[in-house]
Structure formats: C-alpha cells, structure tokens
Image: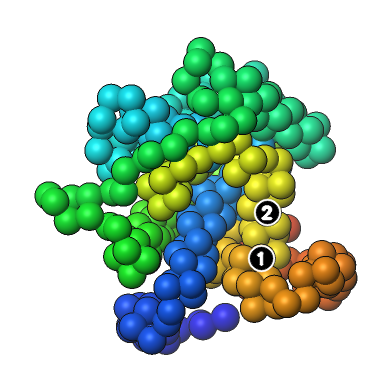
Amino acid sequence: MLASPGARRLALGGLALAAALLPLALTNYWLDVLTFYGLYVLLGLALNVVVGYTGLFNLGQAAFYGIGAYVTAILNTRLGVPVLLTLPVAAVAAGAVAYAVGRPILHLRGDYLALVTIGLGEITLIAINNDVFGLTGGPNGIFGIDRPSVLGFVFGTSLRYYYLVWAVVAVVIGLLHRLENSRVGRAWMLIREDEVAAAAAGVDVAAYKTLAFSLSAALAGAVGTLYAGKMTVIAPESFSTWESVLMFSIVILGGAGSIPGVFVGALGMVVLPELFRDFSNWRMLVFGAAMVAMMVFRPAGLWPARPSAAPGRPAKGGARRAAA
C-alpha cells in the first residue's frame, strides 16, 4: 500500500516509536493484551511461511507451538534450565518433528494436506493429554515455569514482557523480509504459483516444501517458549485445533504472503474481540459475518501481498531466478 521505500521506512519508524511509547500510557491489562497480540503476530508470521509463501494448507500448527512450550516447561521445571536457554532447544525440537512428519505428507495438496495436518494436531494433543512418558502432566499441565531472565534481569512485569515480545517480533520481521527476497523465498513462491513449473525449472520441490514446513514449525516452537514464560503454567487446551484455526484465520484475513497483513489479521482476531468483550455472546456471529464479507469483497485479504508476490501472479524473477 505504501509504494515508495522512503514512505515505508517512515511508516515503520513511526510504528516503532509508537510501540515503544504506547505502553507508558496503558494499564497492565492492555499491556497483556498487546503482549498476546505480539505472540499471535509471531505465530501468524510463522504460519505465513507455509501458507503464504509456499501455498501449503497447514491446520495443525498448534502442535508445534505446543511442542515448543512443553519442551521449555519440562527443561525448566525438571532440570532447572533458564527459560531463554530453552528457546533454541524448543525451536529445534519443533522443527525436527516437522521435518520427520513433513517428508511423507507434503506431497499432498490442498484439502488433503489440511486434513492430515488437522490429524497431526489432534494426535499431538491426545499424546499431551495422556501424559506421554510421564512428562507432560496430562490434563493438569505443568506449573511453576520460571520467568525469562538475562544476567539477573527478570522479565517479571507486564511492561518488561511487552518489550521482550515486541523485540522478538522486530527481529523475526527482519529475518523474514530478508528470506522473502532471497533465492529460497523466490523458490517457495514459485512452488506456490505452479509446482510443476517449479520442478521443471530445477527447483527441488520436496526439499523446499520440507524446509518451509520445518522453519515454520521451529518459529512456532520458539513462540511456545515465550508463551510458557509469560503464563508460567501450560495446559493442553492452549494448543487445541481452535488455536490452529485462529492462526490460519490471521494469515487469510490479513492477506496470505503479506507481513503487514499478519499484523492486520492478528489485530482483527486478537485485539478487537477484547474491545467488544461486553458483547461476547455476539462475537462469533459477528466474526462469521465479517469472514464471509471479507471473502466476497476482499478475497486476497485486508492487506494483500505486493503484486510481485500476490497469489495468482508470477513470482518476481520467475522460474529462471528461482532455479539459479
């Protein structure tokens, strides 16, 4: 929507300044709301790698989010590992599981892949609920997780956690922006536009799909660590299929393949419901009507990807650059 690079940089600078100053005027309740908004932005950005860049339907993302949270909880409460040191372990664990299950299922397309990923999420949830290997605490979950800390500085208040989460958001956006414009990103978008053409151009479709699936899961696992550190207690219901649907809705509502779209989608799915909490009995009705209206009038999302990366258009540089 902002065509010139200068205008985009100015807008980003203004948003960063507003994000830094806004908490000083808010109550702890709204700080927590904006912290969870940041967590869902991260989850949306993670899923956007698979759904937006590569065009794969994944409705089991909550499984990797949960794996990351439980890895952190187990390492912290049983072995005393500091929460932030568990973050890379959680990311690697979630990415490794995604790599293991991704190879046999990623040849599926569309609805079939969506159904299989739903099953993956349900299997993970059942395993957690049944206290697999005596590690997950079953339906009661795991209590007593420490707050994250760095050199004795504990992120123990709402204000500190807000800054921690949004600092991670800024880092992830920078990395994804670089990735989006890299050879890997162009290959993903070429696969999304035409898988057969991508294979004909020399792109290793299976390898790039698996990479997108694993990277997306690893990022979701890292967000699970932040969630566990924020809540200090986790339970299976936090990683249900509804969470996967919520992440998927954030990406589709905002615009698949669009980083700003994820912000808009998360705003509509996480923050606006809090503003209208007094009308909670009507929220789902309004939400359903809004989704139908969006599909009719804005099928590409509220903030669609730029034309070079929009669904239905050739990826920038085409097959030749992706295969180079």
Task: List x then y, in percent, for residue 129.
Answer: 63, 26
User: Going 31% across and 49% down the picture, which residue do you hit?
Assistant: 147
Q: Quadrant of the image for the C terminus?
A: top left
Rendered view: 52 above or below 137: below
Q: Quadrant of the image for the N terminus?
A: bottom right
Task: List x then y, in percent, for residue 54.
Answer: 61, 45
**Residue that mark 2 sits on:** 246
Task: List x then y, in percent, for residue 271.
Answer: 60, 71
Q: Residue 27 occupies which quadrant of the picture? A: bottom left
Work out whether mark 2 precedes mark 1 in sequence or the reverse, and give the earlier one.
2
Tag 2 and tag 1, C-beta contact below 8 Å: yes
Residue 269: assigned label: 1
Helix, strand or loop status at disc 1 = helix
User: Going 65% across and 60% down the picture, which residue do you hit?
Assistant: 250
User: Going 32% across and 33% down the picture, which residue do you hit?
Assistant: 76
Task: List x then y, in percent, for residue 7.
Answer: 42, 86
Rendered view: 318 above or below 81: below
> Alpha carbon of mark 2 to alpha carbon of mark 1: how far?
7 Å
Binning the other alpha carbons within 10 Å of mark 1 as few (below 14), some (14 to 19) or many (20 upward) gives many
Rendered view: 19 above or below 66: below
The amino acid on which the numbered mark 2 sits, given as a three-letter code, is Leu
User: Going 57% across and 32% down the picture, which residue do you hit?
Assistant: 140
Residue 203 can be seen in this image? no
The amino acid on which the numbered mark 1 sits, given as a three-letter code, is Met
